[in-house]
């Protein structure tokens, strides 16, 4: 749903939300643009000492994401807590069922609650926006069950609203492409391993470097690597030289076949074949 408010009005609404709940506050902070806007608004509303950004150090995310999180947290002057997570030790997660994200977020929520208890935080929040609620989101269900709130979703922030707010705030990642966990590249039912995650991370870095694209997903279908790039970046593969270099590099990483998805990147492409999905309500407002 589009909003007519100017970005500064949307930001003011978000800051008022934080003033209403009070501090200290814990922010589940990935380093992406959504959670960065939440973190910045909390810092502006409550003061940086009252804000605790908590970032998971996990093989599920590229190392570059952790570096982004450190950079933004330092820029905003908030407390930054990095916690180690062990999702792959949970068979419910590692076996990769359609509800995989539920188990991941359950563990993360428990760790966030431990931090909140230690620092005396009154509320835990994440960066889910209103458009995120239209897809398969079992992780959102887990967070909701654990009392984690999503102010961007509650206030109706769209993805465009978030990027405008981030730009207005001067955040260095305002135009950073979205990044989901690396496990989302593996078809449901196929086991998630550290080796597969590392291969996917290396493959996506190679595609970015060789093709000069920003939005990349390398979906790991066993012997086949299916590459998705931003729809407006597909033309980068019109070059035979680029195709040859990318194919050669990904085969060196262990795939037998390398394919380009002609539709380009779309969020949750692995969910397209699911018969049943966990889709939160598109409209969420809490009082």
Image (cartoon, grey):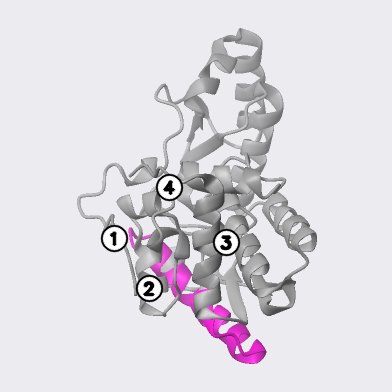
* Labels 4 and 2 touching (C-beta < 8 A): no
Magenta extent: 96-124
- Mark 2 highlights which residue? 144
Is residue 118 magenta-colored?
yes
The residue sitting at the left extreme is: 275
Q: Residue 96: which disc? A: none
Q: Is residue 132 above or below residue 108?
A: above
Residue 1 position in % (x across, y down)? 33, 44
Q: Would residue 67 be found to the left or right of residue 12 on screen?
A: right
Q: Residue at x 74, y 77 (%)?
A: 49
- Mark 3 highlights which residue? 38
Who comes first in sequence, dot 1 or dot 4? Answer: 4
Who comes first in sequence, dot 3 or dot 1? Answer: 3
**Mark 2 → mark 3, Cα distance in angstroms:** 17 Å
Residue 104 position in % (x across, y down)? 47, 68
- Mark 4 highlights which residue? 158
Q: Nearer the viewer, mark 1 or mark 4?
A: 4
- Mark 1 highlights which residue? 280
Who comes first in sequence, dot 4 or dot 2? Answer: 2
Is residue 51 magenta-colored?
no
* Labels 4 and 3 touching (C-beta < 8 A): no
- Find numbered disc 2 in the image and state the secondary structure of the residue it sits on: helix
- Find numbered disc 3 in the image and state the secondary structure of the residue it sits on: helix
């Amino acid at each position: 749903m589009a909003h007519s408010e100017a970005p500064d009005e949307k930001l003011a609404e978000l800051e008022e939300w934080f003033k209403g709940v009070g501090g200290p506050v814990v922010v589940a902070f990935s380093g992406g643009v959504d959670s960065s806007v939440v973190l910045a608004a909390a810092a502006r509303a409550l003061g940086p000492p009252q804000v605790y950004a908590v970032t998971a150090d996990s093989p599920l995310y590229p190392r570059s994401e952790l570096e982004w999180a450190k950079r933004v947290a330092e820029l905003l002057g908030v407390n930054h807590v990095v916690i180690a997570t062990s999702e792959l030790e949970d068979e419910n997660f590692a076996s990769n069922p359609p509800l995989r994200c539920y188990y991941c977020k359950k563990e993360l929520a428990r760790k966030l609650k431990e931090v909140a208890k230690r620092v005396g935080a009154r509320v835990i929040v994440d960066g889910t926006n209103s458009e995120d609620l239209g897809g398969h989101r079992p992780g959102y269900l887990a967070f909701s069950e654990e009392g984690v709130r999503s102010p961007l979703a509650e206030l109706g922030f769209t993805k465009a609203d978030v990027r405008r707010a981030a730009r207005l705030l001067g955040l260095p990642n305002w135009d950073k492409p979205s990044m989901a966990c690396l496990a989302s590249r593996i078809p449901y039912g196929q086991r998630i391993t550290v080796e597969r995650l590392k291969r996917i991370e290396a493959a996506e870095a190679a595609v970015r470097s060789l093709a000069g694209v920003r939005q990349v997903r390398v979906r790991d279908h066993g012997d086949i690597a299916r590459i998705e790039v931003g729809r407006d970046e597909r033309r980068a593969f019109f070059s035979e030289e680029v195709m040859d270099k990318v194919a050669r590099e990904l085969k060196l990483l262990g795939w037998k076949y390398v394919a380009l998805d002609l539709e380009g990147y779309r969020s949750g492409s692995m969910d397209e074949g699911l018969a049943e999905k966990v889709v939160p309500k598109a409209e969420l407002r809490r009082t």
